[in-house]
Amino acid sequence: MTDTQIITAQALRDAALQSKAWPFEEARKVMKRLDANPSAKGHALFETGYGPSGLPHIGTFNEVLRTTMVRRAFEAMSDIPTRLVAFSDDMDGLRKVPDNVPNQAMLTEHLGKPLTDIPDPFGKYESFAHQNNAMLRAFLDRFGFEYEFVSSTERYKAGAFDEALRGVLRNYDAIMDIMLPTLRAERRATYSPVLPISPTSGIVLQVPVEVVDAEAGLVRFEDEGRTIEQSILSGGAKLQWKVDWAMRWVALDVDYEMYGKDLTDSGVQSGKIAQVLGGRRPEGLIYEMFLDEKGEKISKSKGNGLSLEEWLTYGSEESLAFFAYREPKSAKQLHIGVIPRAVDEYEQFRGQYAAQPIDKRLGNPAHHVHAARGEGVPAEGPPVSYGLLLNLVGVMGADATQAQVWAYLANYAPGVTPESAPSLAGLVENALAYNRDFVAPTLKRRKPEPNEALALAELDAQLVKLDSAASPEDIQNIVYEIGKDQRYGFEVLRDWFKALYQTLLGADQGPRMGSFIALYGIENSRRLIAEALAE
């Protein structure tokens, strides 16, 4: 069932206009912009920028996802058509060889050349840029995003930016006045907004440039001891990226583009340049950066980011979108360990959605996760949490199979199959992979303390009295009562649960034990208790 089947379009629009969810707040900026200065192009243009100098990671994907969320929020409030352009700055010169790609020596030989002129180190595509662009597009296509991919190289060489490049030459001195005060003394000596492509080496040159004829696009520069006079039009040069960014805003008439906090100053400078070129900077959100598990900024050249394939090996697509949605203005660590929590938190919000009033739905992350994909929020979810699945496969060991897991699930939720519950089938695969790679190697059950052993023996005695079909709630009540019994000396109930996790599951944290025992089975759970007591 979709949102439009549940609420009227007018009710949705009225609620969207009032919603405080950040995509709607961002979308209202675009509405205000277009109300004040209607665009001649007749649509709202959303843009994302990406530099294919390294393998795309989740941070790259995240920008397209978040921008799509804003786009869909805008569409909920306005009848103005929209477009989303995913722009690849693939004519940029390679400045550093990434650490996480093969054929490093070969890439080193091509430093300085446009990314579309550098061979693909993987040997699959026309160039290094084509390889990285293909990866990004595969990511975006997998999620069903609606976007237009635009290559910087193609636009430059086709002459699509020629008039904008003439504008840069006409305003060369004014642009220099904006940029030079922001640079160190040694950088100022060689800085130019225009980066000519060397006719001999093919390198994107960082040399001073003299404007010869702005209308003809002619500049003069030194290249390997020779004075060269060359047109910057139709691929003869590209722009320094801050100037390039501003030129793009003006040439494409971009209405919205978000970017990371590390580009705050660059955004200010590019905005000033856009104004000099006769345009204006787009609206946009300045988001905080993703950090790795060490708290360091994720970098394409370091390769310390989590790849999309890694996340989707261990977690659901929806959990990735949920993680990206939450608190864009707060720095977040992005590593394997955050995946299980993201999966279960997404499912919690999804489960709340159907019963919520309209205003609460529009603030629910699940709404934006699925709106970005052009679909409604599913009414049904998996019958067990991801955390519970991880605990199940954890006690089953690294060699657990899908068939074994589904046998337990069928007992816990009769009738459930991979065909009837595809979302659960995906989570089973994720849990088995996560357990194999990260959980099983670290699990270590400890010997119970004397008071814990007494409590475990009492739990076993109570379980033997239960029918095999006992509900998770009935089992949980037994667990609670034992933990609260003063004979076993637990100062707080948390100590009892921690003892259960450490002695039975080999972990410091775990699920509701009533749910776990019901899923794993009473006899199997009694076997775990016996093994612990044998210690």
Image (cartoon, grey):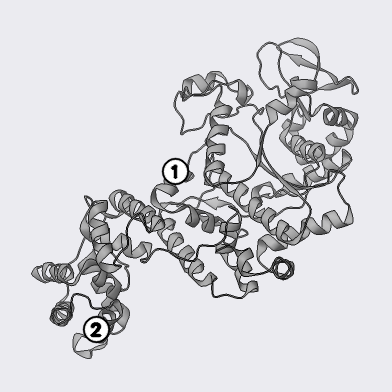
Please give the residue where the numbered disc 1 appears in the rendered image: 309
Residue type at mark 2: give it.
Answer: Ile
Residue at the outermost left position: 534
Left or right of 177, for residue 21: left
For the point 58% across and 67% down, the residue is: 364
Could you classify mark 1 by the number of other residues whose Cα lies within 10 Å: few (under 14), some (14-19), or many (20 or more)?
Answer: few
Q: Is residue 285 above or below residue 100?
A: below
To which quarter of the image does residue 532 belong?
A: bottom left
Q: Quote the CA–CA distance across marks 1 and 2.
A: 42 Å
- Residue 149 lies, in percent from the top left, at 65, 36
Identify the image quadrant of the C terminus: bottom left
For the point 55% across and 26% down, the residue is: 128
Q: Nearer the viewer, residue 32 or 264?
A: 32
To which quarter of the image does residue 419 belong?
A: bottom left
Label of residue 478 in the image? 2
Could you classify mark 2 by the number of other residues whose Cα lies within 10 Å: few (under 14), some (14-19), or many (20 or more)?
Answer: some
Q: Nearer the viewer, residue 197 or 139?
A: 139
Q: Which of 506 and 144 is in front in this view?
A: 144
- Secondary structure of the residue carrying numbered label 2: helix
- Residue 323 lies, in percent from the top left, at 52, 57
Left or right of 450, for residue 278: right
For the point 88% across and 56% down, the residue is: 36
Residue type at mark 1: give it.
Answer: Glu
